Image (cartoon, rainbow, N blue to C red):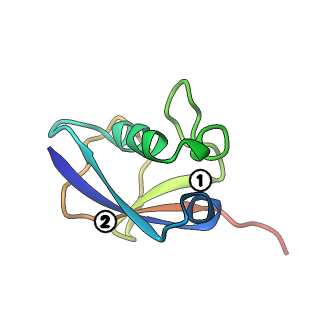
Amino acid sequence: MKKLQIELFGMARRLAQAKETTVEIEERGTYRDVVAALARRYPAFIDQIIKPDTHELIEPYFLNVDARRVVRDLDEIPEEGKPLLLLFVDAGG
């Protein structure tokens, strides 16, 4: 099993009532598996942050790896030891 640390922001932080969390996925698990694990841990994320049928993130939410790059393909395999950030795009004036 692979453990991944995820820092939460915005509504995700409020719904989880936590600043960060850790999820476990299979060794060959994908970012989609990470999102599915988040949905299981925090059912309040469903329909607010996570699409229940596909385990995709609902805009404006996205995953960022190590504060360096945006995850564009949820079927990519994450690297253990690189923290994830569940962020949202904040637009407006």
- Per the image, the residue denoted by label 1 is 61
Res 85 quadrant in image? bottom left
Q: Which element type, helix, strand or loop, lies under badge 1?
A: strand
The residue at 49%/67% (across/down) is 18
As measured in the structure, the alpha-carbon distance from the residue carrying label 2 to the one carrying label 1 is 16 Å
Q: Residues within 10 Å of mark 1 (few under 14, many from 20)?
A: many
> In the image shown, does 77 or 45 lie closer to the viewer?
45
Which of the 4 quarters of the picture holds residue 31? top left
**Residue 59 horizontal/vertical position (percent):** 65, 47
Q: Amino acid at mark 2?
A: Pro
**Where, quadrant-wise, is the C terminus in this rendering?**
bottom right
Q: Residue at x 54, y 59 (%)?
A: 16
- Does label 2 or label 1 sit earlier along the sequence? 1
Q: Is residue 93 left or right of residue 6?
A: right
Q: Is residue 78 above or below residue 83?
A: above
- Asked if marks 2 and 1 touch (Cβ < 8 Å), the reply is no
* Residue found at the far bottom of this picture: 93
Considering the numbered disc 2 on the image, is that residue within a helix, a strand or a loop? loop
Left or right: 33 in relation to 77: right
Task: Residue 64 in the image: state x and y as whole percent.
Answer: 43, 60
61 left or right, relative to 92: left
Residue count near mark 2 (Cα–Cα under 10 Å), binned few <14, some 14–19, many ≥20: some
Q: Amino acid at mark 1?
A: Tyr
Q: Residue at x 49, y 33 (%)?
A: 55
- Mark 2 = which residue? 83
What residue appears at the point 60 percent right and 39 percent down from the top-left corner?
A: 46
Whole-percent x, y for residue 86 in the image: 49, 59
Residue 81 coordinates in the image, percent (x, y): 19, 63
Which is more toward the observer, 15 or 82? 15
Side of 69 relative to 53 (left or right)? left
Q: For residue 15, which numbered disc appears in the image?
A: none
